[in-house]
Amino acid sequence: MRVIEFREALREALSEEMRRDPNVFLIGEEVAEYNGAYKVSKGMLAEFGEKRVIDTPIAELGFTGISIGAAMNGLRPVVEFMTFNFSLVAIDQIINSAAKILSMSGGQYSAPIVFRGATASAGMLSSQHSQAFENWYANCPGLKVVVPSNCYDAKGLLKTAIRDNDPVIFMESEQMYGDKGEVPEEEYLIPLGVADIKKPGSDVTIVSFGKIMKVALAAAAELEKESISVEVIDLRTVRPIDYDTIIESVKKTNRLVIVEEAWPLGSISSEITFNVQKNAFDHLDAPIRRVTCADVPLPYAPTLIEASLPNAKRVIQAVKDVMYRS
């Protein structure tokens, strides 16, 4: 199977869906003439023209509102935020218009729209450009929230998101655009709300999603050297969450560690913890452990960044804690 970059997988998904459906268009800052801030849309202006690959001013609230109106009138916009940190400028339109219009109109209007872009930390970008908002958007009914961890999933999930009739938040990592992975040449779709067991195991379950899957898998590989068998689950979507896959895994391993790049209060890991203790309490042989960001704005200094973010060492310690190993 061929190997391509994460950004190329996204570009293929966008281009294939735009060829398939003339109502799909891409809009955002620098998506056209500059080929995208991270070169996801490279060459798309030349193929699809300026009416379907649209550069905007630096005005997220404005072009988000325009796109939601277009979606309500039959088009299928893909809105690119240079980073989801900037989506906060447009969050009123996303939460109060896109997410609610189907309910408020009694089903007369829908907003089939994808909001996509980079999320969470990406090196020394400090507090205002390093935030993970997956749990913020997942909290809102009417939205679906997708966070791919690899090239294969990114393409299949983005194609599904574009075809979905609900608004979808599609969150990527700036540090993954250059990652390479196997992606089939033939068309495929990945359903939303279905987790993937990336590594089977029998002693403990680790659940994660997005870029932090790298941390989870690295920790699992190290733990295997100590004869600890780890099952690693990639959520892929955090709204809806595939609770069934998690619970079935916990029934087998009896231990759970959840890893995410977010602040601890009100996080995705908090929600999973509640549901597992509610539905699989008798199967737990130890309290559930969470590995999250430190409860502070992300610092600028590399040493403090390392201390703040989830890493393999912290995950390994959490696994040993639930297994009562020193």
Image (cartoon, grey):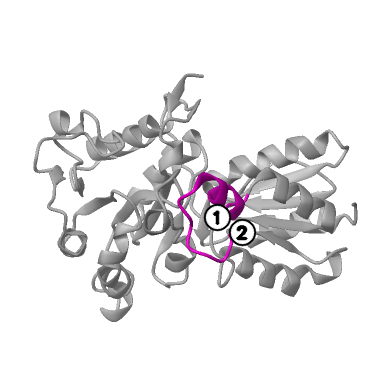
The stretch drawn in magenta includes residue 52: no
Is residue 296 a member of the stretch shown in magenta? yes
CA gap, disc 2 and disc 1: 6 Å
Q: Position of residue 312 (x, y in %)?
A: 68, 44
Q: Quadrant of residue 264?
A: bottom right
Disc 1 secondary structure class:
loop
Q: Which residue is mark 2?
A: 292
Please count the marks in the image: 2
Which numbered disc, 2 or 1, marks the residue that appears first in the sequence?
Answer: 1
Depth check: give the residue in front, 284 or 57.
57
Q: Is residue 158 left or right of residue 255?
A: left
Helix, strand or loop under label 2: loop
Whether residues under marks 2 and 1 lie with C-beta atoms below 8 angstroms apart, the answer is yes
Residue 242, image x, y percentages: 60, 58
Relative to 232, 16 lies left or right:
left
Which residue is rendered at x = 87% and y = 54% of the image? 323
Between 304 and 239, which is closer to the camera in this rendering? 304
Horizontal side, residue 124 vs residue 94: left or right = right
Image x and y of residue 285, in percent? 88, 63
286 horizontally vs 311: left or right:
right
The residue lying at 78 percent from left, 51 percent from top is 317
x, y percent for residue 37: 26, 39
**What is the three-letter code of the residue carrying label 2?**
Thr
Residue 261's mark? Answer: 1
Q: Residue at the location (81% across, 67% down)?
A: 287
Magenta-highlighted residues = 294-310
